[in-house]
Amino acid sequence: MEENKYDYNDNYDDYSDESGQEAVNKSIRGYRIVIILLTVILAGISALYFNINRQQQRDYQLLQIDRDSIQSNLSDLINEYDSLKFSNDTIAAKLVEANQMMEQLKRERRWNYAKIKEYEKEVGTLRSVMRNYLKQIDSLNNLNKKLVAENVSYRKEISTAKLRADVAEEKASELENRVRQGAVLRARDINMVCLNARDKEVTRVKTATTLRVDFAISSNELAAPGNREVYMVIKSPDGYLLTSESMPTFEFQGMKMGYTASREVDYQNEDVDVSIYYRGGGFTTGQYNIEIYTDNNLIGSGSVSLR
């Protein structure tokens, strides 16, 4: 009985050893499977993380590119607004808005697709307003060029008309001067005669009490007919004006001028002989200078030597 007992135990031990070994082997295989599964899962997670990270990097790079593009467009837009140089409240407000957006872009830390699209929309709105103003400015510039061209044309016409008017006025003035000069009366054949107390001609001036100046006023169709006051000026050999005690004067070219004697003459555009007398005394021998004035003009002069 004991011998059989020992044989059973030995057999049981052998069976137990085999079962334990098989269990161990199964556990090892299970661990291996778990390790393999974990390795596969970890590799998948790593690949997924890498792909997600790479996609995020790509998205960030695209967002960065879009951000740089928006900043560049906004900077150009600000320069365009600033270059308008117009005193316009709307343009000034849009320029302030663009500058504020640029500052906001510089401070922005978190970016996403929606934010990018929002900024793109705002920049697009500003650019649309800019284009509208540029069209208006271009239209105004074209209108201004047209007005300038018309103004230049009108100025040329006015200048030409003014030049013609100036030429016509100059010719008219020249003609008027010629007519005025042509209308001046002329005294000719000026002579002086000595008379005594009985109004008889004498040959010696020392015996004379009166000097008579004879001359003729020539006919002139351009001169206006009518009565004229004719003034005679006689200067003695020593250069003194012969005049009366009252020392009368007349107007000549804006100045008062003394004269010797005068006479009213009826002129009718024909030759008229005139004689003017000066009564005095104490005449001396020598050369006497004579001047005849009328209508504010010196119409004749001459000199006579008396013995």
Image (spheres, helix red, strand yellow):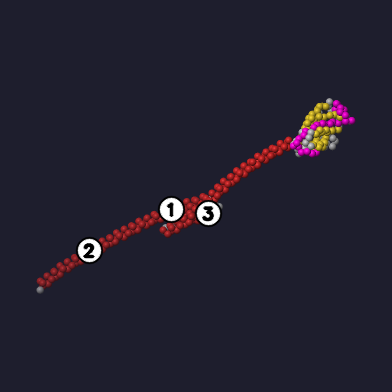
- Say which residue label 3 marks: 91
Q: Is residue 222 left or right of residue 87?
A: right
Is residue 11 visible from the viewing direction of this image? yes
Q: Nearer the viewer, mark 1 or mark 2?
A: 1
The amino acid at mark 1 is Ser
- Say which residue label 1 marks: 69
Q: Of the residues under marks 3 and 1, which one precedes in the sequence?
A: 1
Residue stretch rendered in magenta on the structure: 198-227
Measure the alpha-carbon separation of dots 3 and 1.
Answer: 23 Å
Say if the magenta span includes residue 203.
Answer: yes
Q: Position of residue 134 (x, y in %)?
A: 51, 52
Q: Position of residue 246 (x, y in %)?
A: 84, 37
Measure the alpha-carbon separation of dots 1 and 2.
Answer: 59 Å
Give the residue at the far right of this rendering. Answer: 198
Looking at the image, which residue is at 13% across and 71% down? Answer: 8
Is residue 258 visible from the viewing direction of this image? no
Q: Secondary structure at mark 3?
A: helix
Residues packed near mark 3 inside 10 Å, few (<14), some (14 to 19) or many (20 plus): some
Compared with 221, 26 (above or below) is: below
Closer to the camera, 27 or 303?
303
**CB within 8 Å, label 2 to label 3:** no
Looking at the image, which residue is at 67% across and 38% down? Answer: 171
**Residue 197: which quarter of the image?**
top right
Measure the alpha-carbon separation of dots 2 and 3.
Answer: 79 Å
Say if the magenta span includes residue 133.
Answer: no
The amino acid at mark 3 is Ile
Q: Secondary structure at mark 2?
A: helix
Q: Position of residue 292 (x, y in %)?
A: 79, 33
Q: Position of residue 172 (x, y in %)?
A: 69, 39
Q: Of the residues under marks 2 and 3, which one precedes in the sequence?
A: 2
